[in-house]
Image (cartoon, coloured by chain):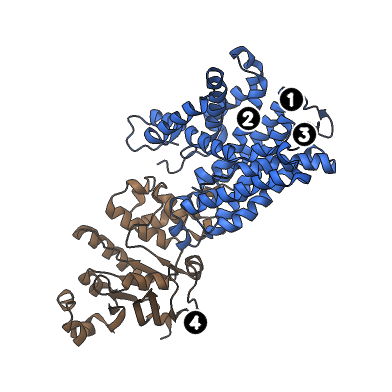
Chain colours: A blue, B brown
Amino acid sequence: MKKHADNHLLTRPGTWIGLVVLATAPLWIKSVGLYPYLALEIMIWMMFALGYNLLLGQAGLPSFGHGAFLGIGAYAFGLLQLKFGAGLWLALFGAAATASLAGALVAAFISHRRGIYYALLTIAFGQVFWFISIKWHSVTGGEDGLLNIARPAANFGLFELSLKSNNALYYFTFALLVLVVIFLWRLSYSPFGRILQAVKQNETRAAFVGHNVWLYKFLAFVISTAVAGLAGALFAMAQQSAYPNVMSLHNSGFVVMMVLIGGGLVSFWGPLIGAAFFILARDLLGAYTETWLLWYGLAFMAMVIFKPEGIAGMWQSWRTRGNPSGTTA
Amino acid sequence: MTALFSAHQLAKRFGDRLVLQDVSFDVEEGQVHGIMGPNGAGKTTCFNVLTGRYQPDGGTVMLRGNDITGGSPRAIARHGIARSFQLMNLFDDFTALENVAVATRSLRAHGFGFWRDAMSAGDAYERADAILLRVGLQDKASLRAGSLSYGDRRALEIAVALAGEPVLLFLDEPTAGLGAEGIARVADLVTELKRHLTMVIIEHDMRFLFRLADRISVVHWGQVIARGTPAELRENVWVQRSNLRQLTC
């Protein structure tokens, strides 16, 4: 009798298909009418969305101000580099650590809440951070943000890799994304991940069987914001700047739309699918009309109404057609 | 014999309404203690106060001589008290096996093992298998809790409560909504559990309770109006005067 879902990452065909597609993207992206920077941007959003899904998809915690932590990561990377002369590794670590510290501060206030109260508090905190980024001119550069952020070389001891080209930064980001995927995959199948999923389904019962629900929600938020901070640092490298718009409510909304449309509520891979779908839709629809977000928003509404499980959910339904028990790995 | 558990002069108020007043009872080790009373008598509120869902407005709760009054559900669970719920309270998207495994002490102890596979976290899944066998759900281990029949979900409720290896188990109307066959199944399970476990049971089915309980407290209007063995209660003047009498005969 098969009792558990297969939790081995490398036994999934989707893993290999995804790896091949992403690893070869710079080779074919121009031939399909797109450009290398787009692939880099998709990769960064994939990382952000994957980290965000630890909260929304796995823990059921609706953070609608998560863009703030992407922005905090971007600013922290820029400030560490511009003010303290930090190298790549220190600045990346510092960005993730700063975002997770800000996340810990927020999580300490909100982890005893759930549902709409939780969501509203995350929006409020997100707006506070956004406001600080605009008003704290001497540190953040105000509305102009931080400019001239460099793409430092990645020093691996034996050799150094220049990240100045978009393709080089793409592969660097790809390597980090793979590490994030492995970490979050392991996490979701760990006791921590299982308990987090239990909290999502029934917080009351989770407390009554002895789990420290507050601490699990707190840690999920902190880990998620650390990943957002890392993605923010890579975004600062890609854009070579950090500015308030990165942490705007727009970006907080975009990541929610990515996760939901991709199917993050039912699949680990949903956020990756959703991020690619969103950025491609933005560019492809945006090429035809300035009102692309209107059409995307309508598509999002249709998805939420008719197939809330998203693209990954459609794929799962197709795979389990004719299997009423719906038990798939 | 020293009581394993005792509630002393518990009080609970919601606004102006006093829903529990001077509720006291002791539970000795190995006993099944029943709580009966009409709808709205305060039985479930009493459970909720005893298991940390509500803070009491007065009184004390002791387990093995330790004061656990007003503890959170988590703290009380960690003291060794588990409970089931009148309204089903499961992890519906998990399989039956995962429902039980996630409630085991073993998984709880490894809860912050970020890198470890949940299935190899101590003996959580082996214990969960054994508990499902005990409640008769071994063949349904891989089915989603949400897809189980009502009777199986009732059994799973008890299985999840058992997963924490409690010293004291609170069962809130374990036969609610069950037919004769389902009630007989729960009765058999409680009889089997009674050999190793101390229990407090709220129950509307008086035949069920009078057959299984060693002692019973009768709650009415938020107060304990009578207590004793089933035989003593049948003779109790308060029970005879109340409309509960017809249920106890």
- Would residue A257 appear left or right of B172 to someone viewing this image? right
Give the image location of residue B231, x and y in percent.
22, 82
| Residue A93 visible, this orientation | no
Residue at mark 1 shares a chain with residue at mark 2: yes
Front of the two marks 4 and 1: 1
For mark 3, give the secondary structure: loop
Which residue is disc 4 drawn over? B65
Which residue is disc 3 drawn over? A147
CA distance separating discs 2 and 4: 58 Å
For mark 2, give the secondary structure: helix
The amino acid sitting under disc 4 is Gly
CA distance separating discs 3 and 4: 66 Å
| Residue B3 visible, this orientation | yes
The amino acid sitting under disc 2 is Met
Identified at 59% across, 22% down, the residue is: A21
Give the image location of residue B157, x and y in percent.
36, 58
Toward which corner of the image does residue A42 lie, by quadrant? top right
CA distance separating discs 1 and 2: 13 Å
- Would residue A135 appear left or right of A155 to someone viewing this image? left
Front of the two marks 2 and 4: 2
Which residue is disc 1 drawn over? A168
